[in-house]
Amino acid sequence: MIALNLVVFEDNYFSNFLPLTYSRPVFELRVGMLTLLDRLLRVLDFKSAFLITRSYLSKIESERREGFNVNSLDKLDDEVLIVNGRLIANENSKVFLEHLIRGKSRVALSGDGSSVVAAKLNRDEALEVLSDSSSRLISVDCFLKLKHRVEFDKASNVDMLCFPWDLLECNSTLMHLDFNLIVDAPGLRGYVDDSVVIYGSTNKIYIAENAEVEGHVIIDARGGPVFIGDEVKVQGPTRIEGPCYIGRKTRILSGARIRSGSSIGETCRVGGEVEESIFHGYVNMYHVGFIGHSYVGEWVNLGALTVNSDLKNTYGVVKVRIANKMYDTGKMKVGCFIADHVKTAIGCQIWTGKTIGFASHLYGVIFEDVPSFTIYAKSIGLGAVELYLDSALKTMFRVYSRRGKTPSEAEVELMKTIFKLTESERRAAGVVKGRLTIP
C-alpha cells in the first residue's frame, strides 16, 4: 500500500494577518471551534502532518505540536498531499482534496492564480518544490519548475482565508460544522443546576462531564450549537447564545453575556460582553467591558471597561490598514485585531477596524493602529513609547505564574525575535525610546 503524507504550508499571505501571525503560523489561527490545522486534520482523518512555517517559528511550533515534523521533510513517504494552511477545511474542500488524492500528480491554483491551494505529488516532486524556499514560505513560483511534468489547474468551490476579517466572517458557519466534527453525542453531561434555562434542543448542546453550570444561567441554542468544554465553570447569572464555543478550563463569570458567534479558547476568564469574536486562549476579561467582531490573541489582559467599536457612526463599510495600505473590508461590522500579550488599562476604548501589535500596552482612546511593543497613551497626552523588551519578558513571567505556568525557552526566544522583527514598524510609526511615566 502506498503511504500518503500530509504537508501543510504557509505562503506570503501570512503577512495579511499580522500582527496575529507574528507568534504563530497562519494555520494555527483559531476560527470556529478549532484552529485551521486541527480542522484540516479532522476532516481528512490525519493524526499528524509535516508543517512548513517561517524559520523563527520552528522551535515554538515543534513545542506546540509534539510529534509533528516541523520544517523537516526527511521522513516523507511515497506520495504527498500538500495543502495551503489558509484553506478552510469544510465539506466542499473535503470533496476537492479527496478527489485530488485519488488522482495523479497535480497542482491546484486559486482562481486568480496567485496561490497554490493544494497539490498531490510524489516524494521527489514534493522535495523539489518544498526545499526551494529559504524563507520557508511556499509560493506559486516554487511549483513552476514542475510545469511541464505535472498537471496544473484551478481549484473550484473551495474557500481560503485572505484577510483577518475573513476569520470573523466564517466563524459562526464553521462552529456549526465543528460541533458535528468534535461531538460524538450531544447532551448535558456535567453539573447543570436545576434553575438553568435552556432554549432550543439539547441535541445542539454539549456540556462536558466535568464542567459546571451554576443556577440562573440561560443557554440559547436556537441560533446554533453551544459547546462547553472540559473543566469549564459558568457562574450565574449569565447568558450564552449559540453558535458558541467555550474551551477547556475557561471561566465565565457572573453577569457575562456570551452572544452568538463567539469562540472562546482554553483557560480564559470572561466577565463582560462578547459578540461575534474569537478569543484565541488565555485571555483575561474579568470585568465589565465589550468586545465585538474582533480577534483577540493569547495572554491578553483586557482591563475593566475596555470596549471596542465594531460599527461606524455612518453605518458605512469599515476599512482596515494592512502594510500601509487601506483595504475596504466590505463589512459594516469589524472590530479590532489584538495580538498576543497585549494589556489594556481601565476604560480603554478601541476604535473601529484597528490593529494592536504584539505585547503593546494601551491607555485611553485608541484611534489608530498600534505597533508591537508600544506603550500607547496619546489620548492622555503621553505619546507612544517603546516597551522595553526586558519589561515585556518580566510581565510574561508574572502573568504565566498566575495560571500555574512558566514560559518555555522557546516562548522567551520567540518574544525576543518578534521584538527585533518589529523594530522598523515602531520607527515608522514614530514610537520613541524612553520611559513612560503614568501620573
Image: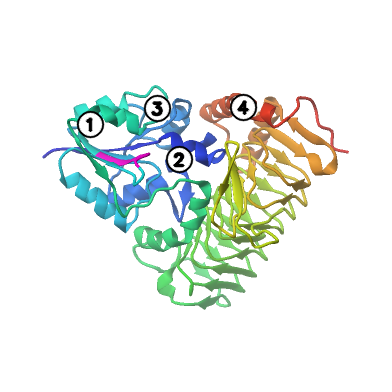
- The numbered dot on residue 419 is 4
Give, as a single range, the part of the protein colored magenta: 113-119
Q: Residue furthest top?
A: 134
Q: CA distance from mark 4 to mark 2?
A: 19 Å
46 magenta-colored: no
**Mark 2 crowdedness (10 Å alpha carbons): few <14, some 14-19, many ≥20:** many
Figure check: 339 above or below 422: below
Amino acid type of disc 4? Phe
Quadrant in which the N terminus is drawn: top left
In which quadrant is the C terminus drawn?
Answer: top right
Tell me, for residue 147, which label it has, or none: 1
Q: Which residue is mark 3?
A: 136
Residue 62, percent from left and from top = 42, 32
Indicate the secondary structure of the residue bearing disc 3: loop
Q: Position of residue 336 (x, y in %)?
A: 62, 50
Query: What type is the residue that disc 1 sits on?
Result: Lys
Lower position in the chain sequence, tag 2 or tag 3: 2
- Which tag is nearer the camera, tag 1 or tag 4? 1
Amino acid of disc 2: Val
User: How far is mark 3 from mark 4, CA to CA?
Assistant: 20 Å
Q: Are marks 4 and 2 in contact (CB under 8 Å)?
A: no
Q: Residues within 10 Å of mark 1 (few under 14, many from 20)?
A: few
Which residue is pictured at 71% across the width and 27% down the height? 388
The residues tagged by marks 1 and 2 sit, at their Cα atoms, a distance apart of 27 Å
Residue where numbered disc 2 is placed: 26
Residue 158 x/y as whole percent: 33, 52
Q: Label 1 to label 3, Cα distance in Å?
A: 21 Å
Q: CA distance from mark 2 to mark 3?
A: 13 Å
